[in-house]
Image (cartoon, rainbow, N blue to C red):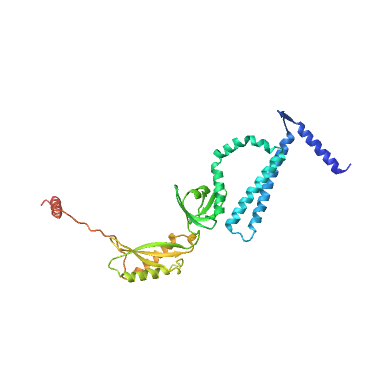
Amino acid sequence: MSEWTKLQRAVTQWARSLDDLGFDVGRTHISLFNAVWMIFVVIAVLVFGRLVSRIGRRAVRSMRGLDGTQRALGEKLMTVTVWTVAVLVGIDAVGINLTTLTVFSGAFGLAVGFGLQKTFGNLIAGVILLMDRSIKPGDVIAVNDTKGSTFGVVERIGVRAVSVTTRDNREILIPNEILMTTQVENWSYSSRLVGITIPVGISYESDLELAEKLLLEATLTVPRVLKDPEPSILLSAFGPSAIELSIYISIDDPESGVGNVRSDVLKAVWHALKGSGVSIPLPQHDVALRDSDGLRRVAEALRRRENPK
């Protein structure tokens, strides 16, 4: 008798011994062997799912000709497919007949509908976002919801949420479903060119042509302001205290922020106007007194009260 035959007989005898240690529930025999086998199958399914899904994701990443959004969608579909196959194979290996699960499909579907509605909604929303490509990794977006406004760069689109990194290096997770039902500003959807309007007021005594020239020269000194399209100066309105002008500029790196480039332009404008004869006026208000004689009498009465002599 060979060693392999002896090993087979020993394993068979060990399995029978474990199978004898159990009890019957109706027509089903529950034994220690079944419990050990089930634990082994669960571990094997977990190891197989993680290993194969990791290999599949690496294979998708190595494919050439795919952009970031297509790779993310391929990785997500690969992961879902691998885990679905692994779970079905595990159920079959345990000995559960898949046809018997149809009895519980109605109750299970109802439980999923109520308990995991948000989870499956976010999952489907994430897949739709990747297929639609309206929001993809690297986009600069602004989301306005009931909790406030969020502005940042999309790092990745996950199964449940989209990771957005703000200018202060905070990573905010926005559920996929919110991006499907809320108005989203995508600053780099079709073009990374972003226009910014900066208001500036000058006094009515200033030379308008000189002011426009100085504003344009100061704006062009800011490195992030694009030369093409060229910045422009527009007359917006004649305000109550100043002539209201608007500086229109364009940038192509919105992920670097908008407030900082607006600040740089205003600083350059301040230094350019200082000492040039073009001033930025303070708010002015004219006060008209209808009963000046009455006010004069009140002032004289108060003066006499303070100095009775």
In the rendered image, the quadrant that contains the N terminus is top right
In the image, residue 62 lies at what x, y percent?
65, 58
In the image, residue 201 lies at what x, y percent?
33, 63
Taking the spot 69% from the left edge, 47% from the top edge, the residue there is: 48
Q: Do we see residue 275 in this rendering?
A: no
Most extreme residue toward the left, as rendered? 309
Most extreme residue toward the right, as rendered? 1
In the image, residue 128 lies at what x, y percent?
55, 51
Question: Between residues 211 and 308, which one lies in front from this camera angle?
Answer: 211
Taking the spot 43% from the left edge, 59% from the top edge, the residue there is: 259
Q: Do we see residue 50 in this rendering?
A: yes
Left or right: residue 283 compared with residue 11: left
In the image, residue 96 lies at what x, y percent?
70, 37
Taking the spot 64% from the left edge, 56% from the top edge, the residue there is: 60
How many marks the image carries: the answer is: 0
139 in relation to 103, above or below? below
Left or right: residue 295 compared with residue 110: left
Question: Between residues 128 and 177, which one lies in front from this camera angle?
Answer: 128
299 in relation to 238, above or below? above
Residue 99 location, quadrant: top right
